[in-house]
Image (spheres, rainbow, N blue to C red):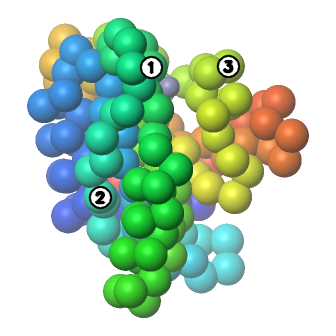
Amino acid sequence: MIRIENGPWSVMVAHAKRTYPNECCGAMLGTIDGGSKQVREALELENAFDGAQAARYELRPEDLLAADKAARDRGMELIGVYHSHPDCDAYFSTTDLRNSCPWYSFVVLSIQKGEFHHANSWLPNADQTAADKEELVY
Ligand SMILES: [Zn+2]
């Protein structure tokens, strides 16, 4: 399961609302204790998708590497990636699956008419053909 502390959760929701009607994306840093992940910091990253960003996001590999380094510098780990779905449910799309990696949690925030609606966390399988829902607490 993944638990997001109030601080990073506020950052993620504010980022998603500010970016609406486009998708936002960012990194989640924190600690892992057995099967339990604790997100302690959220880092806003730039949506680098070169096209309509209302239904698509893209992370630069170098931004993700920098987030990973930032986490390690602070004694944490890069736990996963978040992004928003403007006026769409918090499902994990085929594109999301294709752009994922199996060792991260992927939190999707559904923003409906500019307001936060609901969120889900997804764990892609090793060959990125399906993603299981992970218990999410925020
Ligand atoms: Zn998506």
The numbered mark, 3 or 2, whose residue comes first in the sequence reads 2
Numbered label attached to residue 43: 2
Is label 1's Cβ within 8 Å of ligand 1? yes
On the rendered image, what quadrant is the C terminus found in? bottom left
Label 1, on which residue? 56
The numbered mark, 2 or 1, whose residue comes first in the sequence reads 2
**Type of the residue with mark 1:** Arg
Q: Element at badge 1? A: loop
> 135 and 53: which one is in front?
53
**Type of the residue with mark 3:** Thr
Q: Is residue 33 above or below residue 94?
A: below
**Type of the residue with mark 2:** Leu
**At which x and y percent is residue 33?**
59, 82
Instruction: Tell me the quarter of the picture where residue 1 sits.
Output: bottom right
Q: Is residue 133 above or below residue 32?
A: above
Label 3, on which residue? 94
Tell me if mark 1 has few (under 14), some (14-19) or many (20+) residues whose alpha carbon lies within 10 angstroms of its own: many
Is residue 92 toward the left or the right of residue 88 in the image?
Answer: right
Q: CA distance from mark 3 to mark 2?
A: 25 Å
Q: Element at badge 2? A: strand
Is residue 64 toward the left or the right of residue 13 in the image?
Answer: right
Q: Element at badge 3? A: helix
The numbered mark, 1 or 3, whose residue comes first in the sequence reads 1
